[in-house]
Amino acid sequence: QKEVEQDPGPLSVPEGAIVSLNCTYSNSAFQYFMWYRQYSRKGPELLMYTYSSGNKEDGRFTAQVDKSSKYISLFIRDSQPSDSATYLCAMTSNTGNQFYFGTGTSLTVIP
Amino acid sequence: DTGVSQNPRHKITKRGQNVTFRCDPISEHNRLYWYRQTLGQGPEFLTYFQNEAQLEKSRLLSDRFSAERPKGSFSTLEIQRTEQGDSAMYLCASKSGQINEKLFFGSGTQLSVL
């Protein structure tokens, strides 16, 4: 079983839709959770960073962590064509030495 | 803070040749990571440094791969006797030594082995 599971999609939505991206994980030691956005042939760009369970909002983006279910989500409101990218979830434990990534979900927002 | 810088951005080589990539991390970051990413996959851990010390290497890492960070600043990743299966995006990332600090990536080096 992989440490982090992420539905690869692809996901295609109309402009203005609410997008929900999800990851599950198996290691209860994970404490820090991240979402990265990656455009084609570019490096991942950090979008959201959360610690432990709870919600964090930044503009149109909301990250949720449910440690009891080992489940994290990223919501994108009022999606824009510029949001079209691959979204990677990542997580690490309290030691912060190793980072574990999902396979990424490819998102296309259609104008 | 100019971000993580990687060179070259693209590299095309013939099978059997050696290649070397360079990564310049964010200046105050003492941790530096190398990852490999193929199409449709997440970044796969290769190795990481704390200052000049290489603390961990992936068990999947072939002995054709070697990384250095001689002065605890920039790092190089060398692949000897390249194979077509080495074709991938090679990503460098850096963070400070604090546990809760964020990991920042460079733009990557896209390697194509013909």
Image (spheres, coloured by chain):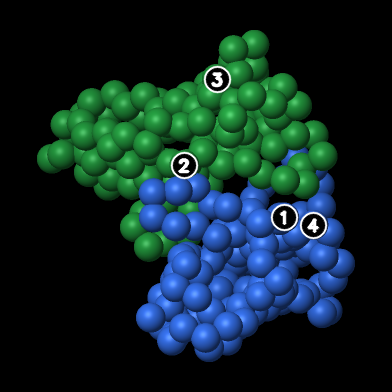
- Label 4 close to label 3 by CB (< 8 Å): no
Report the residue marked by disc 2: A103
Rendering coords of residue B17 (x, y %): 53, 88
- Chain on which label 2 sits: A
Can residue B31 be seen here? The reply is no
Mark linked to residue B56? 4
Q: Residue at x 50, y 69 (%)?
A: B86
**Location of the C terminus of chain B (image quadrant):** bottom left
Same chain assignment for discs 3 and 1: no
Q: How many marks?
A: 4
Three-letter residue code for mark 4: Glu
* Label 3: few (<14), some (14–19) or many (≥20) C-alpha neighbours in 10 Å: some
Q: In the displayed image of the protein, which residue is found farthest to the left? A: A111
User: Chain B shown in which color?
Assistant: blue
* Label 2: few (<14), some (14–19) or many (≥20) C-alpha neighbours in 10 Å: many
Q: Residue at x 82, y 79 (%)?
A: B70
Q: Is residue A22 left or right of residue A55?
A: left
Q: Which chain is green?
A: A
From mark 3 to mark 1, how far is it between C-alphas? 28 Å
Three-letter residue code for mark 2: Thr
Three-letter residue code for mark 1: Arg
Report the residue marked by disc 1: B59
From mark 1 to mark 2, how far is it between C-alphas? 20 Å
Report the residue marked by disc 3: A71
Rendering coords of residue B32 (x, y %): 72, 62
Same chain assignment for discs 4 and 2: no
